[in-house]
Amino acid sequence: MSLSKADLVSKIAADAGITKDQAGKALNSFLGAVEDALKAGDKLTLVGFGTFYVAERSARTGVNPATGEKIQIAASKAPKFKAGKALKEAVK
């Protein structure tokens, strides 16, 4: 089973006793805060839930699987999430 953003908004609205519009605004605000923190190079930690952070990937040499030709892969940054202890325990 997969949960969509609309499903999540409905669940937040029901659990918090607010409208779907208010829940949608709250969720969008949270997602924006995560994005802003990562853009600024900061970590965002929710104790017990987990930490959102940016990992840096160094430049490296790869292989084009179609041709076997070696290619240079540029350095990049990627968003990451590390689950906290409480979340890990809940999933067990």
Image (tube, rainbow, N blue to C red):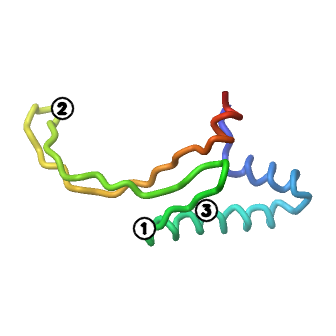
**Which comes sooner in the sequence, label 3 or label 1?**
3
Q: Earlier in the sequence, mark 3 or mark 2?
A: 3
Q: Which residue is mark 3?
A: 31
Which numbered disc, 1 or 2, marks the residue that appears first in the sequence? 1
Front-most of residues 52 and 17? 52
Q: Nearer the viewer, residue 46 or 75?
A: 46
* Foreground tag (3 vs 2): 3
Q: Residue at x 46, y 50 (%)?
A: 80
Q: Quadrant of residue 78?
A: bottom left
Q: Residue at x 63, y 41 (%)?
A: 85
Q: In the rendering, which numbered label is found on residue 10?
A: none
Inter-mark Cα distance, 3 to 1: 16 Å
For mark 1, give the secondary structure.
Answer: loop
Q: Secondary structure at mark 2?
A: loop
Distance Cα–Cα, label 1 vs label 2? 33 Å
Q: CA distance from mark 3 to mark 2?
A: 35 Å
**Figure quadrant of the C terminus:** top right
Q: Position of residue 55 (x, y in %)?
A: 38, 54
Residue 69 % position (x, y): 8, 37
Q: Amino acid at mark 2?
A: Pro
Q: Residue furthest top?
A: 92
Q: Which mark is residue 41?
A: 1
Which residue position holds label 2? 65
The crowding category of the residue bearing disc 1, from other C-alpha atoms within 10 Å (few below 14, some 14 to 19, many at least 20), is few
**Residue 40 appears left or right of 24:** left
